Amino acid sequence: MTVEFETLQNPLPGIPMARECPFSPPPEYKQLRKSKDWFKVTVMDGREVWLVSTYKETREILSDPRFSSDRTKEGFPFINQSQKELVKSSPAMVTVDEPLHSEIRRRATYAFTAKKVEALRSSVQQLVDGLIDNMLDKGGPVDLVTDFALVIPSTVISGILGVPPEDHTHFHELTNKIFTLTNGAEGVAAGRLGLEAYLRELILKKVDAPQEDLISKYVTEYLNTGQLTVEEVVTQVRTLLIAGHETTSSMIALGCAFLMEHPQYREQLRRGDDKTAAGAVEELLRYLTIMHRGMIRLALEDVEIDGHLIRKGEGVLCALNSANRDETVFPAPDELDFENPHRNHVAFGFGIHQCMGQGLARMEMQVAFKTLFTRMPDLRIAVPVSDVRFKTDITVYGVHSLPVTW
Ligand code: HEM
């Protein structure tokens, strides 16, 4: 269906708009990118914010310090209940500006360097092989989310942080409570409080018995020295635990669903080498862009972008999924090319808040996709794709479950 631009009303009713295809952004974005006018969209708290749909302007805004991520600033537009709830805790790196942002980020970056990530590759390979062995032993149909996609990043981030991996169902359920858009204020609050109580207990245990993990480093270097309070450590660990498992598991499951529905791409991946697998991950990240609700910022002063004046106090929502299909940057945005991938996509954001775990996420996905479709070349979705429940009701897009067989 072609959406006529004239049918779009300003302000647009809300985000996310409905999709026509579960693997592509709402069709309206194509028209918005072509428009000379800018559109506003109404967000959860009833405010109208500018909706930015193009690549160049998205990167300009996300790298401009005149646009704030600080949710405590007066008039910051909340696009969902989780943002409103999480701001009640002590500041998280993703919701503050400089200089506090760098101070918070610096304490954790050492655990996500390229060297650290590569050192984990063989254990991730072992984990992935073990999960595939289990599925083969069990026999289909199995749920690829619970038996594969969720386990990989949950186990890996648990290992880095020092969270018992067997608790992953528990912390995933609490995470879901926070990010389910239909959960209501009380449900979201229960999720946050539950997850924070769980982490507080874990952190306090490490005070008595520190180990070789990131939580223990927070405890020995920052908590015990009085540089951070327990609540500040809780927030930092919460951010890493959520970001480290929810996003990557969604990308693995959604990426697998896409590859099973598009055998030509699955074959390219299966026949190619590790470089092809790395290319597949870049293209899937760009094409599927799971952060489908966009990145919100608040203008701290009047700023002119592309001839449009954004006034001090106005909100701006950068639609990463639209920017990643911008035809002025990506010549064939609706096709994937694993041999010549577009590495300059914005699936991990842009600017100072660009994803800290992107190297880790890439490595996990490379191992997961390549190994799964090499060892299970006949893997297919066990139900009609129209019966698959896509996560339109969660902040991070993906699938709720994915029955597969072979
Ligand atoms: C496919 C997987 C992933 C995607 C698509 C993704 C996407 C993103 C995006 C778009 C941002 C920018 C947020 C903003 O500008 O407000 C971000 C930030 C962040 N991500 Fe990821 N992420 C992924 C995996 C991970 C992993 C595995 C970790 C590991 C802990 C992680 C940790 C973080 C952190 C800590 C930030 C905040 C960085 C900062 O504010 O400086 N992410 N991510």
Image (spheres, rainbow, N blue to C red):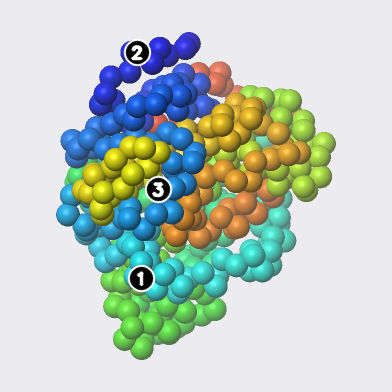
Quarter location, residue 39: top left
**Residue 384 drawn at (x, y percent):** 56, 18
Give the residue at mark 1.
99
**Residue 232 drawn at (x, y percent):** 31, 71
**Residue 369 drawn at (x, y percent):** 68, 42
Q: Residue furthest front?
A: 307
Q: Earlier in the sequence, mark 1 or mark 3?
A: 3
State the CA–CA distance, disc 1 to disc 3: 18 Å
Q: Residue at x 63, y 68 (%)?
A: 116
Give the residue at mark 2.
6
State the CA–CA distance, disc 1 to disc 2: 44 Å
Please identify the quadrant where the C terminus is shown.
Answer: top right
Q: Residue at x 77, y 30 (%)?
A: 267
Q: Earlier in the sequence, mark 1 or mark 2?
A: 2
Q: Residue at x 69, y 40 (%)?
A: 341
Q: Nearer the viewer, mark 1 or mark 3?
A: 3
Whether residue 389 is visible here, answered yes or no, is no
Q: Residue at x 28, y 31 (%)?
A: 40
State the CA–CA distance, disc 3 to disc 2: 27 Å
